[in-house]
Image (spheres, rainbow, N blue to C red):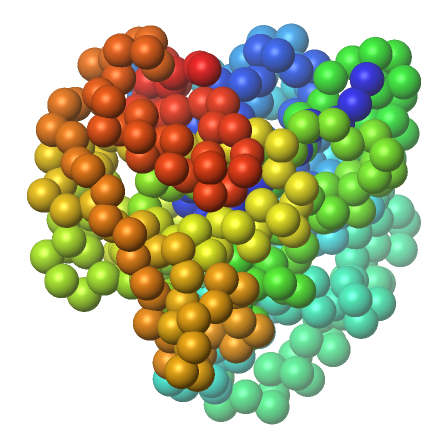
C-alpha cells in the first residue's frame, strides 16, 4: 500500500481540516508531517465546531491511528489545551502516537518569535507567534530538544542549557519578558505528555504500509508558505510541498501514491507578504464577509482576492498533484463578477511563470467567467450543479491539466460532492 498526501496549494486555510476529516474513513492512519500550532484546521459536524492546531484531523473518527510525525514542531501547552477541548469527542490517549523525534517548542522559542517580529518593525512576517521559526532554527542549528528526550534522565540539564542559550539571544533584543509562569505551565504540560504514546513513528508508518494499510499525510499551511518555494521571506519555516511529507514522516518517495491538492475557489492570505490578486475593492470585502475569512489560529482578518492560476499551476507542479479539491465554492454564488488570474504582467511582458520575487510590481491578467446565483450547499450530485459553475470547474481543470475530484460546498463534514 501507498501513502497519500493532502496539502494546501495557496497560502493556507484552504479547508484541509474539513476534507481530511471527510476522507479519514478511507484510511487506517492520518499523520501530520510539518508545521506546528501555527496551523488551525476547522472541522464541523453534529452542530459542533472544532479547531485543531497540532492533533491530526483524523482524530474524530473511530479506528484510525493519528500520528504527529517527526517533521512537526510540538508545543506541550497547546497540546494539553487541545486534548481538553476535544476530550468528549475523541479518545486522544488511545488513538494518537507522537514521534520521539518531533522537536519541542519551548516557552523561550515563543519569546524569541515575538522579539524577532518586534525588531523587524514594518518588515515583520506576521508570524502567528507560536515559536515556529525559532524552533526550526534550533533544530537545524542542532540545539533543539525532541519529544523523546522528556523520558531521559538528563532532560532537565539539556533543557536548562538550551534556555540559557535562548536567554542570551533574547538579551540582544529590546524586549521585556517574564518567563517563570510560562516555564511552570510548560513543565506541567511536559509531565502530562509522558502518559501519551511516544514512538519512533517512522517504523509505525512503514510497518502499516508494509501490512497493506492506507496512510494519509495531512499538510499544514500552504505551498506558497513553503520555506523553499513560497514568497520568501514571508513564509513559514517548514516544507509544505509533497516532498515534506517524506521527510516529515520517514517514508520514501516511491511509496507516495495520490497527492491531493486543495484550493479555495478564491485566494486568501493571513499575515504579511506579496499577494498578486489581492482585492481592495467591494469584492475583497464581500469575500471576507461572506467567507468569514478570519484566521482560525489568531483571529486576524484574512486578506482576500481572486483565484490565481499562476500560483496553482506552480504549486500543482511542485507537488505532483494527482487530484484537485476545491473548497468554499459556495461563497462565490450570487457574485456579479467572477475573475481568475491566468498570467502576470511583469517587467513590460506577460509571463505564466511565477516570478522568483513577487515583491516587484506585478499586474495579474484576468479572464472573466460566467456567474451563478444558486446556493451550491443545496446540491448533492455533481451533474445537477449549475452549468456556469461546472464551466468554471472545467476551466480550472483544463488550465491545470488535473482533475477536480471533490467539490466542497459548505463547512460541514457532509457538505461535499464527489465526482
Ligand atoms: P485549514 O487550515 O486548511 O484546515 O482551513 P481553516 O479551517 O483554517 O479555514 C477554512 C474555513 O472554511 C473554516 O472555517 C472551515 O469551516 C470553512 N470551510 C471549509 N470548507 C468550506 C466550504 O466548502 N464552504 C464554506 N462556506 N466554508 C468552508
Ligand atoms: P493552516 O494549516 C495560514 C502564516 C502566518 C505568517 C507566516 C509565518 O491553518 O493553513 P509562522 O507562525 O508560521 O512563523 O508564520 O505564515 N501562517 C499561516 N497562514 N494558515 C496557516 O496554517 C498558517 N500558518 C502560518 O500568518 O504569515
Ligand atoms: Mg487554517
Q: Quadrant of residue 301?
A: bottom left
Q: Position of residue 406 (x, y in %)?
A: 45, 23
Tell me the quarter of the image containing the N terminus: top right
Which residue is more in the foreground, 95 or 25?
A: 25
- What residue is at 39 percent from the left and 31 percent from the top? 394
Residue 14 image position (x, y, % from top left): 42, 41
User: Quarter-wise, where is residue 45 in the image?
Assistant: top left
Left or right of 73? Residue 78 is left
Task: Indicate whether 217 appears above or below 307.
Answer: above
Q: Residue furthest front?
A: 349
* Residue lying at 37% horizontally and 45% vertically, measured from the top left: 296
Task: Assign the C terminus to one quadrant of the image.
Answer: top left
User: Left of 224 or right of it: where is 277?
Assistant: left
Q: Position of residue 137 (x, y in %)?
A: 71, 69
The residue lying at 17 percent from left, 36 percent from top is 371
Is 182 placed left or right of 283 in the picture? Answer: right
Which residue is depicted at the point 49% across and 90% down? 174
Is residue 266 visible in this depiction of the protein?
Answer: yes
Residue 84 appears in the figure: no
Q: So how many labels did they put on this image?
A: 0
Work out whether residue 180 or residue 91 is closer to the camera in this orientation and state it. Answer: 91
Query: Measured along the vertical axis of the image, is residue 371 above or below residue 354?
Result: above
> Dividing the picture into quarters, in which one does residue 49 lie?
top left
Q: Position of residue 148 (x, y in %)?
A: 83, 44
Q: Give 266 or 124, whichever is nearer the viewer.
A: 266
Amino acid at each position: 500500500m501507498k501513502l497519500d498526501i493532502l496539502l494546501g496549494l495557496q497560502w493556507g486555510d484552504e479547508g484541509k481540516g474539513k476534507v481530511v476529516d471527510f476522507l479519514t474513513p478511507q484510511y487506517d492512519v492520518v499523520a501530520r508531517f510539518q508545521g506546528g500550532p501555527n496551523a488551525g484546521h476547522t472541522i464541523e459536524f453534529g452542530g459542533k465546531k472544532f479547531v485543531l492546531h497540532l492533533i491530526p484531523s483524523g482524530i474524530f473518527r473511530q479506528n484510525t491511528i493519528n500520528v504527529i510525525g517527526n517533521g512537526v514542531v510540538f508545543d506541550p501547552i497547546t497540546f494539553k489545551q487541545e486534548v481538553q477541548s476535544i476530550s468528549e469527542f475523541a479518545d486522544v490517549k488511545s488513538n494518537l502516537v507522537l514521534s520521539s523525534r518531533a522537536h519541542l517548542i519551548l516557552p523561550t522559542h515563543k519569546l524569541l518569535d515575538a522579539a524577532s517580529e518586534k525588531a523587524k518593525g514594518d518588515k515583520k512576517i506576521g508570524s502567528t507567534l507560536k515559536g515556529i521559526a525559532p524552533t526550526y532554527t534550533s533544530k537545524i542549528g542542532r540545539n533543539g530538544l525532541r519529544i523523546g528526550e522528556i523520558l531521559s534522565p538528563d532532560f532537565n540539564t539539556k533543557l536548562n542549557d538550551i534556555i540559557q542559550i535562548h536567554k542570551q539571544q533574547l538579551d540582544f533584543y529590546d524586549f521585556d519578558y517574564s518567563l517563570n509562569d510560562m516555564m511552570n505551565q510548560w513543565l506541567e504540560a511536559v509531565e502530562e505528555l509522558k502518559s501519551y504514546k511516544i514512538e519512533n513513528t517512522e517504523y509505525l508508518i512503514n510497518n502499516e504500509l508494509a501490512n497493506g494499510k492506507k496512510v494519509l499525510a495531512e499538510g499544514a499551511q500552504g505551498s506558497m508558505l513553503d520555506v523553499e518555494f513560497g514568497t520568501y521571506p514571508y513564509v513559514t519555516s517548514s516544507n509544505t510541498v509533497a516532498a515534506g511529507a517524506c521527510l516529515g514522516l520517514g517514508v520514501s518517495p516511491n511509496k507516495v501514491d495520490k497527492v491531493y491538492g486543495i484550493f479555495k475557489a478564491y485566494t486568501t492570505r493571513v499575515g504579511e507578504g506579496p499577494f498578486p490578486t489581492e482585492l481592495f475593492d467591494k469584492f475583497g470585502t464581500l469575500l471576507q464577509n461572506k467567507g468569514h475569512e478570519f484566521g482560525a489560529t489568531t483571529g486576524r482578518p484574512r486578506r482576500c482576492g481572486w483565484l490565481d492560476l499562476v500560483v496553482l499551476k506552480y504549486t500543482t507542479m511542485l507537488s505532483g498533484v494527482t487530484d484537485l479539491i476545491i473548497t468554499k465554492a459556495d461563497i462565490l454564488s450570487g457574485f456579479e463578477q467572477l475573475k481568475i488570474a491566468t498570467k502576470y504582467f511583469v517587467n513590460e511582458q506577460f509571463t505564466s511563470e511565477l516570478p522568483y520575487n513577487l515583491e516587484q510590481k506585478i499586474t495579474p491578467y484576468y479572464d472573466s467567467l460566467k456567474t451563478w446565483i444558486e446556493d451550491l450547499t443545496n446540491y448533492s450530485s455533481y451533474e445537477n450543479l449549475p452549468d456556469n459553475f461546472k464551466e468554471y470547474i472545467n476551466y480550472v481543470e483544463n488550465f491545470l491539466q488535473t482533475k477536480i475530484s471533490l467539490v466542497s460546498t459548505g463547512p460541514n463534514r457532509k457538505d461535499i460532492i464527489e465526482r
